[in-house]
Amino acid sequence: MDRPETRFAWNGDVSIAFQVVGDGPSDLIYLQSPSQVDLGWESPHLSRFLSGLARQARLIITDRRGWGCSERFSPTDIPDIDELTDDLLAVMDAAGSERASICASLECCLVASLFAASYPERTASLILIDGFASYCRTEETPWAPTVEDWEETMAEMRDKWGRAAYTDGKYSEPREAAWFGRYARASVTPGGLAAEIRRYLDVDIRAVLPTIQVPTLVFADLDGLYEGTPEAGRFLADRIPGAKLVEQSSGQTNNGWHWYSRGEGIVGEVERFLGGIREHESSFDRVLATVLFTDIVKSTERAAVEGDMGWRELVERHHAIVRAMLRRYRGTEVDTAGDGFFASFDGPARAVRCAVEISRAVRSLGIEIRAGVHTGEVETIDGKLGGMSVVIGSRVAALAGPSEVLVSQTVKDVVVGTDLTFAAKGEHELKGVPDRWRVYSVASDRVGGVLTPASTVA
């Protein structure tokens, strides 16, 4: 994959580096520690991991403030975590992302979790890799590092970060060890890293976790970089409502960074997770509705008799009648195709009566229509109703004879208790629809009494 362009979002005078990769069906923001958006693509392992994520969504990779290509900080100027969540919002706006899943690792999980809790309307889901709710040991987290443990870690970072001493013996490939040294140095300075760790020693988001209401996937490394990593993951998954926990083992391959031995597994889990969310959210656009299809019987023959101008005038008068009836019965015109109408209703009885009245009214024009009605779940597709229920409605209409209104078994069952009566028309196979379907013709209603399809029209 070609290295994507590095762009900058602005939070006031502070620039935040980000890249956009792919054009998937949803947005996924990725925050990693360590982080340098330009050099990440030089590692075959990290590049493969990022490319895998980009196959699942439009991937937005960002360096958080103080890291990589973003505005750097000094050991005496470490940003508050609230500023980092504001930076993330600026990146989303600059990337044109209204709503995104947020994927983060290690300390970036603190930022991602706070963002999800603060901006649920902008967060589709949350993916936490080896994260933790607090840096230091508490009564609830006895497995977490102590302040003394972190002091030792900070001393090691100041002494070894980005040097050969940090990578020696920890990488199976010399080239990868050399790359990681450059990557670490380009990500953050040793003093900045140690100072940021010190700032975060007081950060504790345990109280925030129950307020996170978005779908959440938590990864925990059984061989984690830090003491208590698997327990920290379990703690997150236990406190975030409905979170899913995935435990993996890195075997400390290449120092245990998640994009090495666990990369493929993480990408696979993310694919299933995001796919499940998209499928689940698509159901939010499904509503129960009644669909009505009508069209003029023998329209081709009649058009030949009328001629172009006469037929056009006849169709216009037909359309005026249909639209008047739709307004009367509170139907919504969804689409027209030639002389056919597709409409929806929020009540099946109104749809049936509307079809009956259209059938009667157009006879004054010397034409007949056929009509079909079905009730079921419909979904919004590009602003229009679609789905299997729409297909069923159109197939039922195609079975109708002149001046006949056919309904599905579902409609007949739903309008029980009204004064509509029906006559059985047998079982039929509907093209493209599973199973066989019982259909019924409307026999009578309270408006016009007995309905009899006309065999001829004067």
Image (cartoon, rainbow, N blue to C red):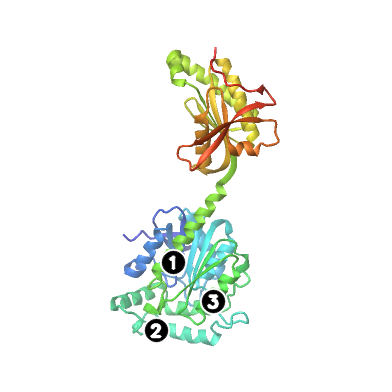
Residue 263: x, y in percent?
40, 69
Number of residues whose C-alpha sits closer than 10 Å to that of mark 1, classed few (under 14), some (14–19) or many (20 or more): many
Q: Which residue is mark 2?
A: 160
Q: Which residue is mark 3?
A: 232
**Residue 362, relative to residue 69: is it above or below?**
above
Q: Nearer the viewer, mark 3 or mark 1?
A: 3
Whole-angstrom CA distance, mark 3 to mark 1, is 24 Å
Q: Nearer the viewer, mark 2 or mark 3?
A: 3
Residue 334: x, y in percent?
54, 34
Q: Amino acid at mark 2?
A: Lys
- Assess whether mark 1 and mark 2 are in contact (beta carbons under 8 angstroms): no
Instruction: Say whether residue 360 is visible.
Output: yes
Tell me the element at label 3.
Answer: helix
Q: Amino acid at mark 3?
A: Ala
**Residue 420, relative to residue 317: is it above or below?**
below
Q: Which residue appears at 34% of the width and 84% of the height?
A: 169
Q: Amino acid at mark 1?
A: Asp
Tell me the element at label 2.
Answer: helix
Residue 28: x, y in percent?
46, 59
Q: Which mark is residue 63?
A: 1
Number of residues whose C-alpha sits closer than 10 Å to that of mark 2, classed few (under 14), some (14–19) or many (20 or more): some
The extreme top residue here reads 458
Which quadrant is the N terminus positioned in? bottom left
Whole-angstrom CA distance, mark 2 to mark 3, is 26 Å
Horizontal side, residue 36 vs residue 140: left or right: left
Nearest to the observer: residue 249 or residue 20: 249
Q: Which numbered disc flags the more N-terminal residue, 3 or 1?
A: 1
**Residue 238, relative to residue 432: is it above or below?**
below
